[in-house]
Every structure is written in C-alpha cells, then in structure tokens.
Amino acid sequence: CQDALEIPPQSNLELGNFFASVADFELALGGAYDVVASHQGPSNGFGSYFRGLMMMGRAGTDEMFVAQYDDHKYIGNYTYTPFSRVPADTYADQYRGISRCNVIIGKINENVVSMSTDSRNKILGEASFLRGFYYFQLARFFGGVPIITESTNINEFKNVRSTLAETYERVIADFKTAEENLPVTNEDGRATKYVAKTYLAKVYLQMSGVPLNDASAAALAASYAKDVIDNGPYDLEPVYGDIFELDNEHGIEYIFDAEYISSNNEGGQVGTWDGTLGPWENNISYKLGRATVELFDSYDPLDLRRARNVVDYLVINANGDTEPITDGTVYAYKWRHDPDPATRGYSTEWQSPFNFPLTRYADVLLTYAEAKWRDAGSSASYSDAEALLAINQVRRRGFGLDINSPQSVDLGSINEQALLDERKWELAFEGHRWVDLVRFGKLLETVQALTSEGSQFAAANIQEYHILYPIPAREIQISGGDLKQNPGYSTE
Amino acid sequence: KVSGTVVDDKGESLPGVTVQEKGTTNGTISDVDGKFSLNVASDATLMFSSMGFKNQEVLVNGRTIFNINLATSVSELDEVIVVGYGTQSRTEITGAVSTLNTDVLKNRPLVNFEDALRGQIPGLDVSSTGGQPGAETKMNIRGIASVSGSSQPLIVVDGFPLNEVSNSAGGGLDEYSGKVGAFAFINPADIESVEVLKDASATAIYGNRGAKGVILITTKKGRKGQSGITFSSYFGVHQMKKRLDVMDFTEYVDYQQTLNPGNRLFTSEDGELFEFPEADKMNVDWQDEIYRRGAIQNYTIGVQGKSKETSYSLSASYTKDQSILINTNFEKITSRLALDHQFSDKVAVGSNITYSRIINNGPPTGGREGTAAGLTISALTAAPFRMDNNTASRFRRAGVNPYQIDQDEQSNIGGPRNLADNTQLDKIINRAIANLYVDVAFTDWLSFKSTLGLDFFTLVDQQYYAAATPWGALNNGVGTSATVNARNLLNENYFTLSKQINDHRFNLVSGFSFQQNISDFTRAEGRDFQNESLGYNSLQSAAEWFSSTSADKWALMSYYARANYTYDNRYSATFTVRRDGSSRFALDKWGTFYSGSAAWNVHNESFMSSNNMISNLKLRGSIGQTGNASVPLQGALLDQQFSNYTFGGQFANGVAPSSLENRNLTWETTTQYNMGLDLGVFDNSLSFTAEYFVKKTTDLLLFTPLSISTGFENGWLNIGEIANTGIELSLGYDLRTQSGLTWNTSINMTSIQNEIKALGGDGQPIYIDVNFDGIYSDEVILEVGGSINDFFGYKSDGLYLPEDFDSNGDLFSGVPTAGSGEQPGDIKFKDISGPDGTPDGLIDGYDRTKIGNSLPKAYGSWNNSFGFKGFELDIILQYSYGNDVFNATKTKAGIFFGNSENQFSDWLNRWTPENPNSTQYAGIPVRQPADFLIEDASFIRLQMVRLGYNLPSKWISNYGIKNAKMYVAANNLAVFTNYSGYDPEVTTNQSSAPFVQGIDYGAFPRAKTYMAGINIQF
C-alpha cells in the first residue's frame, strides 16, 4: 500500500520513467543539440549561437563591431565585466548542454535499454561529440573550467576549475569517443565520424597556439585534417556565395551547423542581427553587427568573397534595389534574405531560418595548411606543397577560378599573415576571427591598430588579458571563492 | 439522557454554555435558547461552564430535566477545547493552544473571516495583501520559519485539512494574483469555534504539516430544542481612507517644463512655455476617476434543530462586495448542511456538506510596468488630464501643435480609466466539500471513528485585453480561458480511548490516514481578434491560438497516536507521535515526528486551597518536532521538458531536464520548546497568559542558486537553519457591576526575534530578487546572522549640495559618485565599501547594505466589549510596531526622472537653491533599492467599532421572534501611522518569493467600511 506514495510527475517526463526506448534517447539528444542553437530558452537567447557566440567570436575584432545596445556593444568594446550578461549566459549555456549530455552518456553506459550496437554507438557518439563541443567553446572563451562528466549529484558537487590543458584533454577524449562511435553518414544536422575528426583537427590546432602552445598538437591537427581531406565526404562548393544560400545549407561543403528553421519557435538571428538595413516594414536587419572598414579594405578588389561578405550599399526596397552608403561605413551582408516580405514567408524578427556554419570544408583546408606550417616551425616562408595546395584551393575558389589548376592568385609560400588573412577573407563573420587572433597571439595588436568608426572603443580599451572572457561573477560568488577569476578581471 | 435550559441570574437564557459529564470528554453546548441535551449515565455529575459565569455541578441522580441558573463569575477552566483528532478539557491541555473569543464571531459583521483573527491570537500574525475583496491574507504562527513557500498555517475544518488554492490560472496581467485562503470558502456565521495550535505539543499530531502551526475550525451542528431559524443581514459602504498627493495640472506643467522640456505639449520648439488659463478645468486626479464609493451587502439564513436521533444545521449566505475600485466586484454564495444521526446506541453517522461559489471580477491592479502596468500605480503616474475634445481644444488654443495633441490622444490607451474599462479579469471558483463519518462507540470508553472527506475545486479564469489597452494592443486583442480542477480525498480512521480510574484519567487517540490530491490545468489563449465583441467567449475567432495543459498528483499517508494522562486534575502529560509518508520526496519519503509535554495545575494543589485570590495557576512545558513538506512536486526529481531542435531543416522534438535531481530532498524539521504560564485571580476575572518559545527550523527547503556548472541555475536543497524566539503575553479583565454594566477587555502582545543561523554551503548570502520591476534587483538578502525579510540596498547620506561641486559643475574628488551626472539636490548615497573592502569614492554594488526589515518587533491588539442593558459596544484596536515597508510604489511615482509620467507632489518641495533647507530629494542617482524607499510602517489601527442593541423580548415575542439585535459598525475607521502609502499593512504578491512580506508595489488600497445590520432568531 506504500506504492500509493510512488507518484511520478503527471505532466513532465521524469528521469525515472524516461530513457525507456531508443526513441527516448533520440528525444534527449534533440535536447542536447538544442543548446547549440540556443534560442529563446532560459537565458533569452543571450547564450549560445543565437546571440552570444555570434558576438563573442566576431565582435571586437578587425571584422566586426557592435553598433547598438549597451548590453551588446560591450563585447565589441572590451568593456564587459564579470557581471555582463552575454558572456555569463554563454558560459551557462555550454554547461546546460554539458549536463544534458552527461545524463545521456550516463544512461547509455548503464545499458538501461537494450538496443542494437549501431544505435548505442550512434547515441554515445553524438552525446560525446556535443559534450566535447561545449567544453571546446568553454576552453576557447573562458580557459580552464570545472569539468563535470556525470549527471549532477548535488550533494557531492564540487566546483573547481581544471587547468586549460586538462580541459582540452576532456575535449579530446570526448571527440575521440565520438570519432570511434559515430557513423560515417547521419541525418543532416547531426554529428558524424568526419565531423568529429574535423573538430579533433580544430582542437589540436587551437591547442598548438596561444595560450596553451602545445608543440606536439600541430602534427595531430594536420593528420586529422588530412584524414578529413582524403577520406571525408566533403568538397569545396564551386561558387563561394552558394554556401550561404538558404536552399543549399547542407551542400557539399557543409560539415556542422547551428540549425534554424523559420517556424515552431526554432528561428535564429543569423543575417538579421547583422545584415543591411532596409526601410520597409519589418526591417530585415537590426544592423547590430557591422563590418569594419578595415575588413572591406583588406580584400583584393578582385576577390569575389568581398562582395558576398561586406557591402557598401543598402538594400532599400522589396525589389532588392540598393543605394550606396555615403558615409564611408560598410555592412556585413553574408546571409541574404529575400527582401520582399510577401514572398519571404517568415518574419525576420526572431525567426530567421538561416543556419550558422560552425565549420565547413574550407575551414578544414585552412586548418590543414596552418597545422602543417606550425608543425614545421611556423617559418616566415613555408612552402610545403600539400599545405600550399590546401590554401590555394580556397583562394582560387574565392576569386572564382578553377580550383584544380594553378592560378595567378596562388600563394608561393605561407606565413603567419597569409594564414590569418586567408581565414579572415574566407571565413568572415562565421565566428572564427576572435579565436584565430587569440591563437596567433595577435588579438591585442590587431585590435589596437583599428581606427575605423565603431572600432575606436575596442582599440582604446583592449588589454592583454582580454584573450579570455571573465568567469561569470555569479559563479564565483556561489562557489564561495573556490572558483578563481581569469587574470585581469576584478576579483568579484 | 438529560436535557434542560440554562439561564443567568436575570432569567435570560444563556447560549454557549458548556455542559459536560464530569470526568469525561462527553459534552455539549447550550443553544441560543440556553437549551441543551446530553446522553449521560444516570449517576453522572453534570458540569455547566461558560465564560463569565461560575461553574456549577449538578448530580443527575436519575433526573432528566434540569433548569440551571448560572451565577455570574469568570471561570473558563473546564471548557472543552478542540484539539487535533478530539477534544480535551482546559485542565488537560499541556501545549500552547489559543481559542478565539467566540463573541468575536457572534457579534461582528465579518466580510472576511481572517478579520476575526487579526491581532486576536497571540503569536498569530495576520496581514492583508491589499484591500481587494477576496484578497489573500498572509498568516504566520510564531514567525516565518520557512523560505520555501508561504508560511500559511495548516487550516483544518471539521477534521479536514484544506489546501490552499490559487485564485489565478496565471498569464496575462494576472501573474501576481494571490491565492484564496481556505477561509474564503467558509461562511463566518457557520463557525462554532476556532482554536489555534502553536507549539509542537499541539501540532505534532499533524506531523510534516505541523511546523507552521494549525488553525482548527469547528462548524455548527444542530442541537436539540433549538429548532429555529436565524436570519442576519448587513449593508455597508466602503470609502477610500486616503488619497496620495500627486501633482495637479499646473504643477505637472511646471514639472515637465523643468525636467522634460522636450515635452511639446507644454513647451514650444523655442522652449517657450504655453499658457493654460483654464488649467483647473483640465486637471484630473485619476484617483478620483478609478476609485468610487463601494458597497457591501450580506444575507445569511440558518435553520437548525434536533429530533430524537437526528440533528441538522442548514445555512445559506450571499455576499456582494463592490469594492472601492471601479468594475471590481466580488460575490460569494455559500451553503451548508450538517446532518448527524444516531443510528443505534453504538453507531452514529453524519455528514457535513458545503458548497461555495466565488465570482471575482476586476481589472488588474498590481502588476509590472509599461504595457503591463496595474491600475493602482497608473492612477498615480498618468498625466493629470484627459485628452478629450474639450481638453484638446484648450491645448490648441494655448498654441500646441495639433500633431502633438493627436499623439497624446493615442497614448491615452494606457490611461487608467481606459485600462479599467477595457480589461476583463473574470474568475469563478466553485468548491464543494463533503465530510462523511461513522462513529462506533464499542463501550463508554472506547470508540472508533472513520471519516471520508472530499474536496472538489474548480477555477475558471477568463481574461480579455481589448486592442484598445496597451497589453491588448501588442497583439490586437488577447483573450485567455483557463480552468483548474482539483480533487482532494482524505480518509481518517482512529480509535479514541477515554477512561477515568479514580484520580487517573487517560485519553488515547491512535489512527491512520490517507490523503490524495489530483489536479489538472487547461489553458487556451487567442491573439489577434478581427472582431472583439465576443472576447474570451470566442477564442476560436482569433487568428492565433496557444494552448497548454498540465496535471499534478500527490499523496500523504500517516500513522499517529497521542496519549494524555492526568492525575487528580493536578498533573498532566501528553505524548504525541506521527509518522508521515509523502509522495513529494524521492528517497526520504517517511518521517517521524514526536512531542512530549507536561502541565502542573498548581491551583489544584492542597497547599493552594487556602488561597482565595488565585483561582488558576498552571505551568506548562513542551518539546517536540514537526515538519514542513511544502516543496513543489517535482523538487526531488529530474524532470524533463521539451527543448526542440531542427535537423536538416526538419523540426524535431527534443527533451531536456528542467530541474535538478535531488533524490535526498526531504522536509524541513522544526524543533520547538515552549513554556507557558496561565494565571487567573479573583475568580478568573483577571487572567493572564504568558508563553515563551524557541522554534528552530533545520534542513530549510530552498530553491537555492546553484553553480551553472551543474547545468541549472537553481535547485531545491535542504540547507540552513532559522530560529524564531518569542514571547506572547495576554491579559484579560472582566468587569461586572451590580448596575448591569459589563466590560470585557483583553490586550495581547507578541514579540518574535527571527535569526538565520545557517544557509548551507559556505554560508554565502542569498539575494532575493522580489521581481516587482525589471530595473530593481536583489531587494532582500538572506544572510547568516540576519533575519528573514532584511531589505538590502543603498543608504542615503543627505543630498548633494552646491558645495560638493566645483565651478564646472563637476563633483569634487572625494565626494562619492555613481558617475550618473549627479546634480545638487539629488540623494547622496553612502560610500560604504569597494572591491577591496574599503570605501573607494564610487557608489556601486559594493555599497549596498541592510536598510530595513519588514518583520514587526511587536504586534497585537486591544479588545473592549461594553454591555449595558441590552446595549453593546465593541472597540478593537490593532497595533504593529517596528515593521518596515518597502514602498516600491515610489519607484514609479517618486523618482522625478522627468519623463511624461506624473509624480508625487513631494517634488514641489524639493531642494533647490531657492529652497536650500529642504530635505526632499530632487532626484536619485542610482535606480536600485535604497533607504528612501524603506519606511517605518508601525501603526495603530482602529479596526472595528460596533454599537449594538438587543431589542427587549416584550417588543418582539409577539412576532415569534426570540432575539433581535440591531447594530451599526465601522471597520478600519482610522490608522495612525507615519507610512506614506495607502496602508501600512501591505504585502504585494510577488510570485518569485512568497515568504517576502512588506513590499508595496501598487497594492490595492484598503477601504474603511460603515455598516448596519440585524440578527434575528425565530
């Protein structure tokens, strides 16, 4: 009769009766992926890619500044503090994702449901990949962080930061589990074996630079990138602009995206948070993220990627007519909405359907070139043929040339500047620039050199310690001081 | 079986006299005619007792009819007191139990039953959430001992614990609507007695729900010889007690010209002020527009009686309360049937069935800001004119640009009158409660009782926000319709053993109970209405719909026993144990709660027998543990909610944990020590009771802020400890003169010290965001060594004066600044600390500190009843001392920020170079909680004055009327306080922190009410 007291929640799925089938695991995976896109959830979209990482990887660099709203501008202006919402919510969202993965991995390891080895491996692989992904974000933006790998038992919870090296070890371990277990092909939007390999290359590359400077990592990055190039299912999209067209989001170059659609409250703000301003009703853009004039000027005028990424005109009506900007400023305009609200089919307020590419094949090629260069000692004139081919294929495509034959725009050798520039031109506004500058140890000098309108605050405010964002003040407060702040930020 | 009539020494029949078989708990109470009947042994002794009369003992000796004449005196010692699962005589009571003076119930026209308790019971703090009819009343017994939810005591009506139920299905502007107290469903006229159980000895029988104290309500039953009809009715009017002083039109123009020169309604592009010769005709005080004279009416009819085996009590009532706020009305219908039948010598069965219906309509009053502003605040901040045609033409004549006038007309949709007229919040609550029992008396000392209680509750909450209101405008009309259904079932089974052997008296109760509650919720919302005429009745005509459903279920299973032993009416001891199992917890479902207590009736000792002065002297002591299990149902479990994603452009459901698992979560445990002294002298005409208690609550349930590394921002944990230490004093005096003048007076005082002893973890303070406004945060701090409801914020240090500024108008270095462009006359906040723990010249988060506390240092009441030849005069004063109120209304109407909102007229007396002696701030540099918002809200309230007259029986007896009383009364006639808001006794409902009291954010003003009524018995 004491069974009368065993009452599960009536309208919520409870852990005790959840994870009863493969379908339940798939539902839980859906929740774990959801944090990647992180739209209007508990943190109102300030956390992961919906807003936070669209700012934190991009603004405050030589590609973008934030033009409006104090609580957005501080990212670009380096005036954020441990109390600032965007980094704090971004930090929180990664852990929200990690805790979801921890539950799935714990349950799959408990073998609570009998299932085929393929299903089990796929679920374990995807959850491990996502956990690695979230720790990778934390490591890049916040440094060494507390590592939690099990479903939280609140009575035994300890909140202590691991070192950066330990945090990267965690990332590598998770990505390797993912690599071993994931299938080669999977539903679009989900991780695969080659997504995991791509991320292993990216992690090792980041480890090989500032601040960890792990000398042995570059070779590993190169070898993973090579594996993806040689054996992976990816290739360069023939036309650069096609990568960012709404109807081609999962084209040949696609590896892994933060995914959005325009319905079911699953829209994002890609191309609306930045973009050009139109005067008609339902403005396509909030024009919050603006391109720097330095970026525009740095492109070779013949480089077709400039016209796709940065523009010096406004779209002024539903026909797509434009007019030039006369005040010398430029706009980031990579993801392009149908300018006509009538045919667009979605509101651009909160429901932008554009995915945000987290990595794509060109990133792998450039990763490979950089990893080889680093492994060879970061020389001022590196001319390994394979590395050159990788970077030159990206360049050739950028100039609209045949990628399989030598071209006039080919580089004859690689150096630091060439690698940084090619990544900037190719991957503009895709969330790489800030971490690239950090990895090369160039963030401070690059930002200080900015002079264009909108970037002067960043140039004036940036300090050496800004290669890491602050641990949120709330976390330090709750830890009672166990958690230590990153250097440079006030202790509370 | 005996029966008879009790009269006083003037021959008037005496109702309410306790008739008891001596040495047992068998007893009854005389009816309105003084008649009684009781089954007793033929050799028994009958004891008659009543407040204000000498006890009388009569040997039955085979007789059946008794006409008793009670002599005036004062002795309440042998009253029968209702306790959990039974009754005890006053002598046997070992714990702290207060009984409400039933005169309060008989004589007062009670709109809300809570008003009868206000200040009357030492240790019971009753405070209103506002003056809205049917508004929840916050009650706590012996201090706030929990931070997890409300401190509301357990309310048990005729043995059935009633759940708190919500008055709102949420959503819309109704977010902060309160709960409906269990009392709201009771007709005060149905109540026979009210007992308040305070210490562990008294409440341990309620186990894991006993920690917050228990209020026991017993309703009336039919009695023999009393086949009669009672009718009562009253009418009343409500009036605003106070207006708040906001600027009138001319003053507002001055304010706009000074602080908002860009307002083109008053100043031209060239900065020239327009002239308004008819300013007085344009002026509107919106308080006049939305408040009105309210009215209340009540009718109650009762029929009761008893035949040989069957007694019945039937009643019905109707109350209509039109409050002082326009369109805000409250209607209540109650009906009740109590039926008791003696089936055989040994078996009795009965039922008590009530049905109540509450209809509650009105626009939103509290609430947030902008589009969601409530009426109370917007009546203060709306610009003091109505842009109608007349006013518009006056503006035009003054030279204002017609475009500006049009703009202002459009912005009028936020006007309070428009909001009141175009917003519908309609609620209907139906509640039916049925209690059935069977009582088997195996012998004269052993009986068994089994009860089945059923409680059906339905709330229909429908709202419509027309497109002409700010909230509705966002979505072109918003309508919602929501229903809450709840079913609560309780089965109790217990044995009672009651036996006297020589001087040894035993009373044992032991039983088992099971309670289960099931509820469900359905809500539909429609947005975007092309035709608004059907409102919430036709949500399908909206362009967009949303719907949601949810369900809850919990169960409680318990075993309990209590043993009471009394020796020679001198020594008593009580032991109680209850074992409770709750479905709310995952692992620690079961808890056991004990108490032990003893009492010494010193006056019954032989050495006291020669003492004629002391008629009662009793010492009591108790110790015990009780629990509080009011944690949300999912608190212990990792529950999953939908968190969706898209794969390859296809929408896909996902789920994710929405709360942290804590399978070890368990109840709060309260350990309480109590010492009591009862003293009566001069035949108890003077009585005194003192209690001292220490109440320590450990394993506090708290929705604790967690490190986000857990994946969650908060989680339910058992952390911390709170202690409440207090004294309760009450003094009563009963004067009866030969001339027939009587005066019954009592005064009581409660003083409780609250201290947070521990908060778990590393003892970090916990900041509570009361959430009345998005700009203000962390208004309350929980800190070890502090107290519940410590307000937190900046301290002021006078005003910035010209000498603080250099010739450029910049602050001299060394003068603390928040860097917000301070001006002379602004509040200067104290620079208390900085990042290094020392003052740093900056006014920032480090300078915040404790700035007040809402808990009173002492509270109580002074009650007086005078009687003279059929006239009655009652005067009740209630007081509270040392409580602060956070006047959050000032954050809207007293900040002088210079936007177009109107403000308190305090601004007119602000500091200026021309008014250099003023201490009134002209502005505030930091828009955060600060001490200028904290006010001492100590008060003395003239709660009730009533003058009644009992018509002489010779006037009325020809009409078949036994008794008739007429009265006039006034409730809440005056409040003496320094608090600047509408009323110092205030707590706005803020869902984020239900235990936080004393926040006034647009609270509904409390009215004063004048009433006249009659009570008639046929």
Image: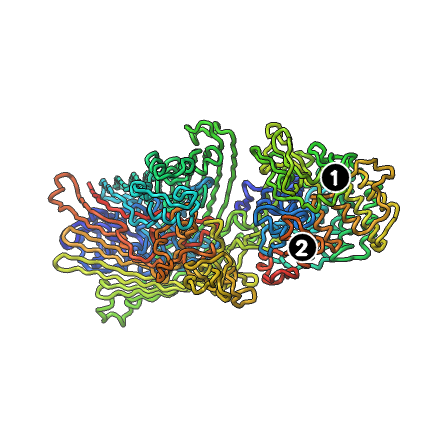
The amino acid marked with disc number 1 is Arg
Question: What residue is at 85 percent from the left and 52 percent from the top?
Answer: A381
Position of residue A123 in the picture relative to residue B397 (left or right):
right
Q: Residue A429 carries which label?
A: none
Q: Mark 2 lies on which chain?
A: A
Question: What residue is at 49 percent from the left and 33 percent from the top?
Answer: B527
Who is closer to the viewer here, B318 or B383?
B383
Distance of mark 2 from mark 1, alpha carbons?
31 Å
Q: Earlier in the sequence, mark 2 or mark 1?
A: 2
Q: Where is residue A386 shown, x and y percent of the image?
A: 87, 45
Question: What residue is at 83 percent from the left and 54 percent from the top?
Answer: A378
Q: Where is residue A370 shown, x and y percent of the image?
A: 81, 49
Residue A62 in sight: yes
The answer to whether residue B852 is above or below residue B223 is: below
Q: Name, please, the residue furthest toward the front.
A: B270
The answer to whether residue A257 is above or below residue B626 is: above
On the image, numbered disc 2 is attached to which residue?
Answer: A142
Q: Where is residue B6 shown, x and y percent of the image?
A: 19, 51
The answer to whether residue A304 is above or below residue B566 is: above
Res A37 quadrant in image: top right
On the image, numbered disc 1 is attached to which residue?
Answer: A305
Position of residue A347 in the picture relative to residue A390 (left or right):
left
Q: What element carries label 2?
A: helix
Who is closer to the viewer here, A294 or B471?
A294
Residue B441 in sight: no
Who is closer to the viewer here, A384 or A187?
A384
Q: Mark 1 lies on which chain?
A: A
The amino acid marked with disc number 2 is Phe
Q: Residues within 10 Å of mark 1 (few under 14, many from 20)?
A: many
Q: Where is residue B376 shown, x and y percent of the image?
A: 37, 45
Q: Residues within 10 Å of mark 2 (few under 14, many from 20)?
A: many
